[in-house]
Image (tube, rainbow, N blue to C red):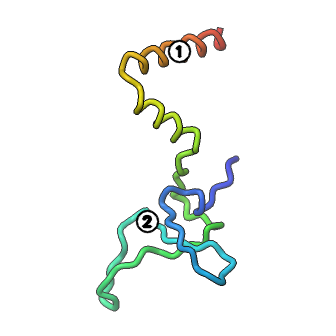
Amino acid sequence: MEHKRCADCKFFKDKRIPLIDVQLGDCVRHAPVITQKKNSGEFPLMCGSEWCGEFEPTKSRERIAIEISVKSMDSESIIAAIDKFRDEITSIIR
């Protein structure tokens, strides 16, 4: 089972706080809550090693590299790459 933690979640916005040895950040999963006591909203402050239950992983470096590569390709090259990938997967399945 994958270990889920706020620091690896796409909703976690890291706050670098000098002199503190704990990774803290805002959880921006939902809009901040505005109360009568405070006329401004704040995102919940989370410890990077915790997890709220609504974890969504950040994009992996490999995924980002693929997206950048695809964006730089023309449509015919993308279709050819998809066909090649499909053929490779089909040969593995058989």
Percent from the top left, x then y, of residue 88?
Answer: 60, 13
Residue 64's disc is none
Which residue occupies the foreground of this view, 80 or 42?
A: 80
Q: Which amino acid is tagged 1?
A: Arg
Percent from the top left, x then y, of residue 53?
Answer: 55, 60
Q: Relative to residue 10, is residue 73 drawn left or right? A: left
Q: Residue at x 48, y 32 (%)?
A: 69
Q: Which residue is drawn at 43% across and 74% down?
A: 43
Q: Is residue 75 above or below residue 38?
A: above
Q: Relative to residue 10, is residue 5 drawn left or right? A: right
Q: In which quarter of the image is the C terminus?
A: top right
Helix or strand or loop: what does disc 1 sit on?
Answer: helix
User: How many neighbours does mark 2 have within 10 angstroms: few (below 14), some (14-19), or many (20 or more)?
Assistant: some
Q: Which residue is drawn at 48% across and 13% down?
A: 83
* Residue extending farthest bottom: 37
Residue 86's disc is 1
